[in-house]
Structure formats: C-alpha cells, structure tokens
Amino acid sequence: MKVALGVEYDGSCFHGWETQRDVRTVQQAVSDALSTVAGQRVQVVCAGRTDARVHAWGQVVHMQCTVAREMRAWVFGANANLPGDVSITWARPVPEDFHARFSARSRHYRYVILNRPVRPAILASRVCWECRSLDVERMQAAAGYLLGEHDFSSYRAVACQAKSPLRRVHRLEVIRTGAMVYIDVIANAFLHHMVRNIAGVLMEIGIGKRGVTWTQEVLRARDRTQGGITAPPEGLYFMGVEYPGDLGLPRVSPPELIW
C-alpha cells in the first residue's frame, strides 16, 4: 500500500532533510520510526527537501510497504519512536500513482524575521534577527516584481542542481505583526536557497540600502553574484503543499498566536 503522511519538525538540530552518512537528518529519523511500525524497512520521499536548521509545519511524504496498518497506527506508532523535534501529524492512503513531490501543484514557504534592536534568546534558533528597522511597504512593493514565471538564476544557490531556473511565483506577501515580519511565498516549485535569497534581497530593500526596483534588477541579471546575501536558515519554514483536491489530503495550519 502507499501512504501519505504529514510531518512537522524543528530543524535546529538536523543536518537537513536528506539522509546523509554519520549526521542526523529528518528523513532518516522518519524512515526509522515508520520502519519500526511496519516491521520492515521503508523509505520516505518528501514534497520538498529542506536544508540544515530549516523547519517545517506542513511537510508531506509518501511511503510504500507490503503490510497494512490503520492510519492511526502510522501516526501514533511513528511518534512513539520519533525524537521530540519531529512529529507525524496525519496519515492517509493514496493511489499508487501519487508522489509527494511530483503530484504537488504548489508549495508554501514562510520566512520569519524578528525585527527589533535586541537579539532574541528563546527564538534564537527559530527566527532571523534583524536589528535595523524594516520598511514593510517598500519590501512589499519590491516583491511585486517577482510574481509570475521568471528565470530565477539570480535567486538560486550556485550549487543548485535543478535543470531549469524557471519557476512561477503565485503569491509573495510581506506582513508585519508587532516586531515580527513574515515573508510568505507560494510557487509551483522552488530552487535551492530561492526563498532565503529572496528574503536577503527584500531585507536590504527594507532597511533602505537598495531601491525598490532592485528585486527586478537582480532578476534580470540572471547571475547569483548580483544578488544579496542568503538569509539565515533559522527563519525558514516549509508551511505546506497543495495537491489535487480529490486526494482529500489535510493541510495543517500553525497556531495563530505564535505565527
């Protein structure tokens, strides 16, 4: 049978999603826990790989195995075998042709910035801290140039292995709530470091170091060296995935009081 599962994790102490030798990864932790429940070795495939210290509210994975378990057993059995910084939030049976990555219509990331003069303590590993005041209206105006389908070569990591730099951004919003600034990005797919590089450019515009049209100038250059800094990984969250509605897969929203 094939099963899709929702995964939530605090990436602070992980070396990213993908299994690597001799380091702690989310994929390895989830695969090990589900293998214990299945009584056989299973491997999970995710909707979007995340880097070291990047978090997820709504990661989606799929797995295949030859044993039947109740969906409740996959959730609570796996969680009984997972460390405290990873949790399975739901499980659903899916058709054989379902693929967590290739069946996705869009993905949603959120970049979280604590914008105040004093550095954080409790949130140090969960937000990006910017001590200089950010002008959210300037950042939102600049974000508009990135909507639609573009060549995002200037916004991807030099080592990005994607065959094409073309991506379609459906939504890009910058919102302030008190000292917190959120950058929400929804796109059909993302390049390596794309959201963090967008956040880096928008923050330079927000502090007044660059003009509002700089996002467009960087985009047109199609050259990563023309872009800004790559924003720190701690502020990045994989929020969720959109799939065809007939699959009936749930979407988990974060607690509003926190984010």
Image: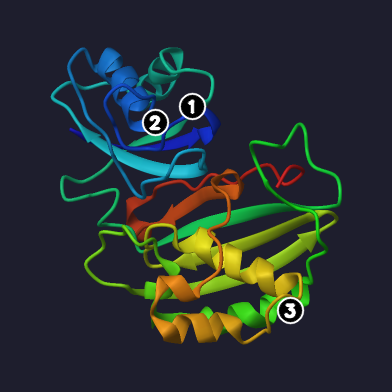
Picture layout, residue 229 above or below residue 226? above
Type of amino acid under label 1:
Val
Question: What residue do we see at 57% from left, 71% from top?
Answer: 172
Gap between marks 3 and 1, in whole Å? 36 Å
Q: Quadrant of the N terminus?
A: top left
Type of amino acid under label 3:
Arg
Residues tagged 1 and 2 counted as in contact (Cβ below 8 A) = yes
Q: Is residue 49 left or right of residue 114?
A: left
Gap between marks 1 and 2, in whole Å? 8 Å
Type of amino acid under label 2:
Val
Picture disc at residue 26: 2
Mark 3 or 1: in front is 3
Q: What kind of element bears circle 2?
A: helix
The mark nearer the N terminus, 1 or 2, is 2
Q: What kind of element bears circle 3?
A: helix
Q: Is residue 91 left or right of residue 198?
A: left
To which residue does mark 1 refer?
86
Query: Within the image, what quadrant is residue 33 found in?
Result: top left
User: What number of labels is visible?
Assistant: 3
Q: Position of residue 115 (x, y in %)?
A: 79, 55
Residues tagged 3 and 2 counted as in contact (Cβ below 8 A) = no
